[in-house]
Image (cartoon, rainbow, N blue to C red):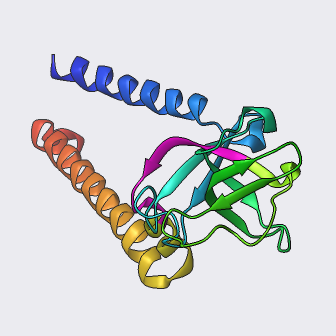
Amino acid sequence: MRRIFKIFFFFFLIVIGLSFFVAFRPVQIGGGAYYYVVSSGSMTPALGVGDWIVCTKTSYSDIDVGDIIAFKHPSEPAQIIVHRVIEKNESYLATKGDACEGKDNFKLPPQNVVGVFSGFKIPYLGTILYMSNHSLIGLVVIYYIPIGLIVAYQVRLLYKNIKGRKAKNPIAS
């Protein structure tokens, strides 16, 4: 019965993982989701520094005042900003960070909009991902220690299994 439960639980985790993947599959493989890490406090309290967020592709006509959008900065296209829409007309958007006093000092053309915040975020995951990719300590803590623990546990189980087989069948050794 315990083995059946483990098998069921394993397949349950696969189904959950696949459903998240289908719902939030990245644009690179034909989906409609972009993933970003919030790097500043300009959207506090709606979004915190280090939050991992999902934005979805959308048309310009579907964007409304009050939506949180991800967009390419007009003068620095490599920089992605996540702010709230405060004004919209046919030719541009005006945006503002929730924690900022004034609106952004540029008019955002429609072609610079990357996506609309879907409402799905995981707090602090972005900080963890950043640490794991940009520092040796983060790499060790996030990857190497857990992998080492899993390997050590598996080696221990294998050793117990081999030792148990030898005890049951002393002729084979």
- Position of 64 with respect to 73 (left or right) is left
Figure check: 100 above or below 86: below
Residue 123, image x, y percentages: 39, 57
Q: Quadrant of residue 76?
A: bottom right
Residue 11, image x, y percentages: 39, 23
Residue 77, image x, y percentages: 84, 68
Q: Is 140 or 122 nearer to us in this picture?
A: 122
- Position of 2 with respect to 126 (left or right) is left
- Position of 162 with respect to 17 (left or right) is left
Q: Is 171 or 41 nearer to us in this picture?
A: 41
Q: Quadrant of residue 79?
A: bottom right
For the point 38% across and 62% down, the residue is 147
Boundaries of the magenta span: 115-126
For the point 17% across and 44% down, the residue is 166
For the point 74% across and 41% down, the residue is 27
Residue 137, image x, y percentages: 42, 83
Q: Main SS of the magenta segment?
A: strand
Residue 79 falls inside the magenta stretch: no
Quarter of the picture containing the N terminus is: top left
Figure check: 1 above or below 54: above
Q: Is 73 or 34 nearer to us in this picture?
A: 73
Figure check: 150 above or below 25: below
Residue 124 falls inside the magenta stretch: yes
- Position of 130 with respect to 32 (left or right) is left
For the point 54% across and 64% down, the residue is 38
